[in-house]
Each structure stands twice: as C-alpha cells, then as structure tokens.
Image (cartoon, rainbow, N blue to C red):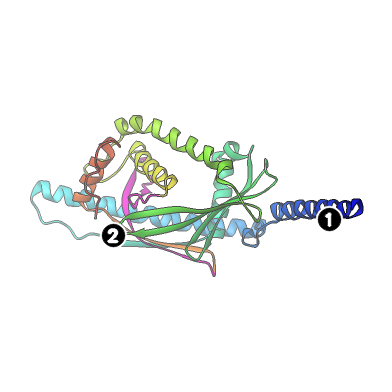
C-alpha cells in the first residue's frame, strides 16, 4: 500500500513539474504573428512610405478645409459657390510594417519611448482578418503581452471589442489587467470636463486639440466598455495645430499582408453642428442625433 501511495505521489509530482514547464514554455513563447524586428534599412523605407501617406491625408484635409472656407465666403458675399477641389472621400491603406516603423521613428523623435520604455519594449500593431492586435514585450512579465480586438463599423458606430488578452501563448485573466483599464477610463473621465470647456470647432470646420481629445477620449471609454462609439476621426492640418473632423465610412483589415484600409469623408455643416453639440453635452445627458 505504501509503495502504491509513493508511486502515486511521484506521478502527481511529475505531472505538476511537466505542467509548470508547459506553462513557462507557453508564457515565454513568442507568437508567430509577432514577427521579427525590421532591419534598419527596411525600417527607414517603411517609415518614409508611411510619412508619405500621412502627408497625403494632410493635403486632402487642407483642401477640404480650404473648400469649406471658399464656400463660406461665397455664401457671405452671395456669389456662386466655387467648385470643390478635394475628392468627396479619401482612401488610404497602411501596412503594419509601415505603421510600426513610423511609430518607432516618432517615438525617438518625440520622446514617446520615455513614457513607456520602463514597462514595454518593441511595441507593435498587427492586422489579421477582422482582428487588430496591439502587442509589446512586457518587462514585468518577461513575455509578449498582447490585446486582440475585433473592430466593427456599422450603423451602431465604430466598435473595438476586446476579444482576448494574452501573455505569450497563454490567455491573461482579466483580473490581471482590468485595474489598468479602469485607471485609463477614470483618467479620461476626469479630464473630459476641462477639455469640453476648451473645445472649439470653428465655422470653417477646424477643431482644436481639446475638441479632438473629447471625441477620442469618449471613443476609448466606450471601447473599454465594449460599446461602439462615434466613427469620427481627425486629420491634422499642417499649419495651425488644428484638425479636420471626418467620418469613417469604410474599415477593413487584410491578414495576408497585415494591412489596414480605411475610407473617410468630410462632414457636412449639419454634421459639424451636431458634433459640436455632442462635444459640449454632458455625458449624463442624452446624446444629440449622431452625424450621418
């Protein structure tokens, strides 16, 4: 009997050791989709390609803003409105390599790495079919931490549902990171009143930084609650620190080349008025009718 019990204890102990080893292996494993760092020459080329596309969006935003100014002046002088110069919509496509190379470059230029470098290294974005992955090597975990989202764009708005969180190849219990999510929500919520007081969108459709902060903060808060938000993005103007609000009308991701394609259109005057009302409204109040 004693020998049998000893054998059972040895077998149980062996199972525990094997299980622990498997957990460590899965935790330390680097997911295949995380890939390898880009070579310096590749990173430079991809960053340049991304900056060219960013410049394209800025040029379209500037033309859109200029068209709004010309139309407004024509209305004030009661003359015929001039033809618009900007296309009705803008289509742009970024690969993950382009965005990651650009983020790495700007992290150095603008000092962003000082904000996250103590905790994370080699942050990356990955696009799969209908999946958006944000990942980085966590210095605390000693593993690749990743958050997997399922973006949607429909009549309800822009959704960024979190479908899983992982460390290496293992799922992360929500209790390990839920407090960080709540800290983010609390920080954004506390800043909203100040941003609302400072928010401005001029009659020509240019939004200041505070207005942009209100809209994006609310989108992040709703995403943290797995709820859709307004599909409103902002394209920066090059000359005055302001941005043009646009409506996201198409969103798709392709896992074959890890790319993101979006389509946006400028807001009409009515939609801009509705957006201003929504920015000013308290979160406790019912939202005005959404643009579009």
Depicted 117 relative to depicted 126: above or below = above
The residue wearing badge 2 is 86
Verify whether residue 238 appears in magenta: yes
Q: Secondary structure at mark 1?
A: helix
Image quadrant in which you'd find residue 125: bottom right
Q: Earlier in the sequence, mark 1 or mark 2?
A: 1
Who's the residue at 65% across and 62% down the image? 32
Checking the image for residue 222, the label placed there is: none
Q: Secondary structure at mark 2?
A: loop
Where residue 285 appears, x then y in whole percent?
A: 25, 37
Classify 10 Å Cα crowding around label 2: few (below 14), some (14-19), many (20 and above): some
Residue nearest the observer in this picture, 78 or 118: 118
- Comparing labels 1 and 2, the label whose residue is closer to the camera: 1
Who's the residue at 53% across and 67% down the image? 255
Residue nearest the observer in this picture, 223 or 276: 223
Instruction: Give the Cα separation between the discs numbered 1 and 2.
Output: 73 Å
Where residue 182 appears, x then y in whole percent?
A: 48, 37
Instruction: Specify the farthest residue to the bottom.
Output: 256
Please report contact status of discs 1 and 2: CB closer than 8 Å, yes or no. Answer: no
Question: Position of 18 compared to 42: left or right?
Answer: right
Question: Magenta part of the protein: which range?
Answer: 227-256
The residue wearing badge 1 is 11
Who's the residue at 36% across and 42% down the image? 218
Depicted 274 relative to depicted 193: above or below = below
Image quadrant in which you'd find residue 170: bottom right
Instruction: Specify the farthest residue to the left.
Output: 78
Locate the C terminus and report the quarter of the image it occupies. Answer: bottom left
Verify whether residue 76 appears in magenta: no
């Amino acid at each position: 009997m004693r020998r049998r019990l000893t054998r059972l204890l040895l077998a149980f102990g062996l199972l525990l050791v094997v299980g622990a080893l498997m957990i460590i292996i899965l935790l330390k494993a680097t997911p295949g989709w995380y890939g390898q760092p880009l070579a310096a020459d590749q990173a430079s080329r991809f960053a340049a390609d991304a900056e060219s596309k960013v410049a394209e969006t800025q040029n379209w935003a500037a033309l859109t803003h200029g068209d709004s100014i010309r139309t407004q002046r024509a209305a004030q002088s009661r003359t015929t409105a001039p033809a618009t110069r900007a296309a009705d919509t803008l289509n742009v496509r970024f690969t993950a390599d382009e965005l990651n190379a650009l983020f790495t470059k700007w992290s150095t230029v603008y000092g962003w790495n000082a904000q996250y470098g103590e905790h994370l290294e080699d942050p990356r974005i990955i696009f799969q079919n209908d999946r958006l992955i944000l990942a980085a090597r966590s210095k605390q975990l000693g593993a690749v931490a990743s958050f997997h989202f399922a973006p949607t764009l429909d009549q309800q708005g822009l959704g960024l549902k979190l479908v899983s969180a992982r460390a290496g190849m293992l799922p992360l219990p929500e209790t390990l990171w839920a407090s960080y999510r709540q800290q983010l929500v609390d920080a954004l919520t506390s800043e909203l009143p100040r941003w609302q007081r400072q928010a401005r969108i001029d009659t020509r459709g240019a939004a200041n930084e505070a207005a942009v902060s209100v809209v994006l903060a609310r989108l992040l808060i709703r995403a943290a609650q797995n709820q859709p938000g307004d599909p409103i993005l902002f394209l920066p103007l090059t000359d005055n620190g302001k941005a043009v609000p646009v409506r996201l009308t198409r969103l798709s991701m392709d896992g074959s080349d890890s790319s993101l394609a979006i389509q946006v259109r400028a807001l009409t005057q009515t939609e801009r008025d509705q957006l201003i009302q929504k920015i000013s409204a308290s979160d406790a109040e019912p939202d005005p009718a959404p643009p579009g």
